[in-house]
Image (cartoon, helix red, strand yellow):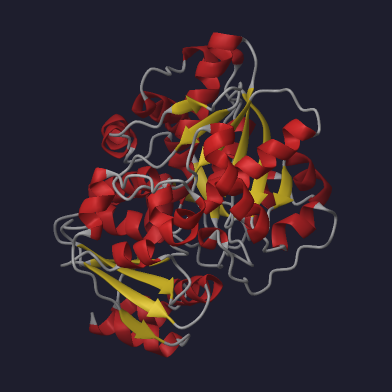
Amino acid sequence: MRFVSTRGASPALPFGAALGAGLAPDGGLYVPERLPRFSADDVTAIPDARLADTLASILRPLLGDDVLAARLPALCAEAASFEIPLVALKGSNDHLLELFHGPTAAFKDLAARFLAASLSALRTPDAPVQTVLVATSGDTGAAVGAAFHGREGFRVLILYPDGKVSPAQAHSLGAFVGNVHALRVAGSFDDCQRLAKQALGDAALRADVPLLTANSISLGRLLPQMGYYAMHALRFQRRHGRALNFIIPSGNLGNAMAALIARAMGLPIGDIVLATNANPTLAEFFEGAPYRGRDAMPTLANAMDVGAPSNFERLMWLADGDEAKARALIRVQRIDDARIRATVAAAEARHGVAPCPHTACGLAVLEDLRAAGDTRDWAVAATAHASKFLDVVGPLLSKEPPVPIAFAALLAKPARSDRIEVDFNALAQALRER
C-alpha cells in the first residue's frame, strides 16, 4: 500500500515514509492510494476483545509490507494501553463513548501514542534530533507532549492560541520539561495551524531543523482513531444484530474522518452526525453553501474553534471530489454557547453524566434527534473529561467532577510557556534556537 497527496502533485510513499513526511511536498494531506475493503468474512474475523487487536487488524491492510508492519501489534499495544469504554446513559438506549481515559484526559491520547511509538520505531541511531511541531486548539498539544516526553531523538514544540484555551489546558501544555516546549501564539488556532503548515512546507527551514508534524494532518494521528469506532461498532452489531450510529463533536474533522474511513473500509458503522460549535464553516457547507474557510471565532467548546478544517481535503478525497457525495456521507449540526450551557446544566439529571463543552454539543444533537423521533441506537463521542473545562462547566454542575489521576499529576507540575506573535519569522527563529 502506498499513500498519495490529496493535491495529486507529490510522489506516492509507503506508510512509514508518509508518516515521517507529515505534510506532502505539494501542501496536500496523505491518503491511501486505494482504500482497502473488508469483505463480510474479513469483518467476521476481526477481534473485538481488545482495542489493540482490533486496531492492528484494521491497520494491517493499510500498512501492507511497510517497514512498520512487523511491529504493528506492539505499536498498537503501546498506544491502546488504557480502556475506552462504551457506557450506557441514564434511562435510555443511548451511549457515551468515553475517549478521555488516556494520560491527558482527551481523545487525542491514543493516536498521539501510536504516532510517537511509530516514529521511534522508524528512527535510526545516527539520525539527527527531529522536532515535532504541533498546533493545538487545546488538547492535541498535551497529548503529543505526553507521548513524546523523554523520547530520545525527539523534541516537541507546541503552538497554542494565547488566552483561547481553558486554564487547565494551558497549564497542561506548559507542564512538561526537557524536550517539550510550549509557545503561546497571539492569535487563533487557525493562525497556529497556518504557521505550522508554513514551517512544514519551508524547505530552507527544514534543512536546518528536521521537522515532523503531530496534528491530524499526520496519518499517524488520523488512522489509529479508527480503532475505537471499529471495536465498538463490531461489538454492538455482534451483540444486538444492528448498527451503532455515532455523534462526533468535531472542529478539524480528524476524529470524524477516522470513523468515515473505517466505515468506507466495510466496518459496520451506521450513520455519523457531526456536532460542531457555533463556528459555521462545516455546517454551512453541509447545508449546501460553497466551502469557505474563515477565521475561527471563540466559543465555550474551544477545542473545536476551527474556521478552516485541514481534514476537509480528506473528506473531499473520500467523496471523489464530489460535493454532493460529500454531503451525503454525514450530517452536521451547530450548537451555540447558550445551548452548550443548557445541555451541561441538564446533563446530570437527564443523562447521569457531567460532560465537557464539546461532549455537550454531541448530547445536544442526540436530544434533538430523539425529539425528532429518531429511535435508533446512538453513541456520543465524549472527547475530553469535564475537569479540563471547570471554568465553563463548574458553575453549571451540582459538584465538580473529580480530576483523573494522570491528568491531576500533570496539573500538579509547574508550567511555563513563551509568547510569540503570529509571525513566521518568529516561529522559524524559535525553531532554530531551540
Task: Please state the horizontal and vertical placement of residue 276, each as a whole percent of the image.
Answer: 65, 53
Q: Residue at x 64, y 57 (%)?
A: 277
Is 312 situated above or below 419?
Answer: above
Q: Closest to the observer: 367 or 112?
A: 367
* Quadrant hosting residue 71: top left
Res. 123 in view: no
Res. 190 in view: yes
Decide if residue 134 is on the left or right side of residue 328. left
Task: Please state the horizontal and vertical placement of residue 143, each as a whole percent of the image.
Answer: 34, 54
Task: Please state the horizontal and vertical placement of residue 37, each as a whole percent of the image.
Answer: 59, 27
Q: Closest to the observer: 408 or 274?
A: 408
* Quadrant hosting residue 273: top right
Is 275 situated above or below 198?
Answer: above
Is 358 situated above or below 366?
Answer: below
Q: Residue at x 46, y 88 (%)?
A: 423
Q: Residue at x 32, y 42 (%)?
A: 102
In the rendered view of the protein, which quadrant contains the C terminus? bottom left
* Quadrant hosting residue 49: top left
Decide if residue 28 is on the left or right side of residue 161. right
Task: Please state the horizontal and vertical placement of residue 111, each as a whole percent of the image.
Answer: 39, 45
Is 28 situated above or below 191?
Answer: above
* Label total for image: 0
